[in-house]
Amino acid sequence: MNKFEFSRKATSNKQKLTALNQEKLKAVLSFFSSLHENGEINDKTLEVLILYAYSIFVENQVEILVEETLERKLMTFLRSKFETNS
């Protein structure tokens, strides 16, 4: 796999994971909103749940970026080792 292919696949994978993460966040927020509208949770509980959902969303996004960066660095390192040994 050449550098361009790896970069393109990583970007595609990142976009898919980000989209999935966003869909999950929207679904959770919708669920919390429906619980609030039905009177099953109060304003304060809704606020806490929303903050928690957003913190999980941000954590997932950071994990995606860190994983992508580590993969890219590892591939660069391995390529440099194999190129110098060839």
Image (cartoon, rainbow, N blue to C red):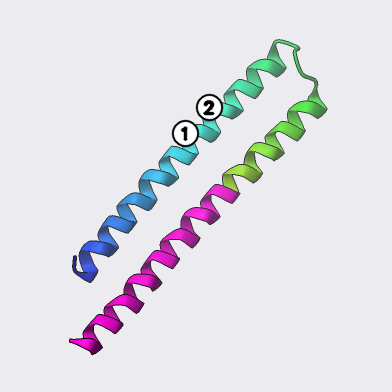
Q: Residue 7 appears in which quarter of the rendering?
A: bottom left
The local crowd at label 2, few if under 14, some if 14 to 19, many if 20 or more residues have their Cα within 10 Å, is: few
Q: Position of residue 31 (x, y in %)?
A: 60, 21
Q: Which residues are magenta?
A: 59-86
Which residue is located at x 38 percent, y 71 percent?
74
Above-or-below relation of 72 to 13: below
Q: Amino acid at mark 2?
A: Ala
Q: Amino acid at mark 1?
A: Glu
Where does the N terminus fall, quadrant-wise?
bottom left
Q: Which mark is residue 27?
A: 2
Residue farthest along the front direction in this orientation:
85
Magenta-drawn stretch, dominant element (helix, strand or loop): helix
- Label 1's element? helix
Left or right: where 85 falls relative to 27: left
Label 2: state its secondary structure.
Answer: helix
What residue does disc 1 label? 23
Task: Report if residue 63 lies within the magenta region.
Answer: yes
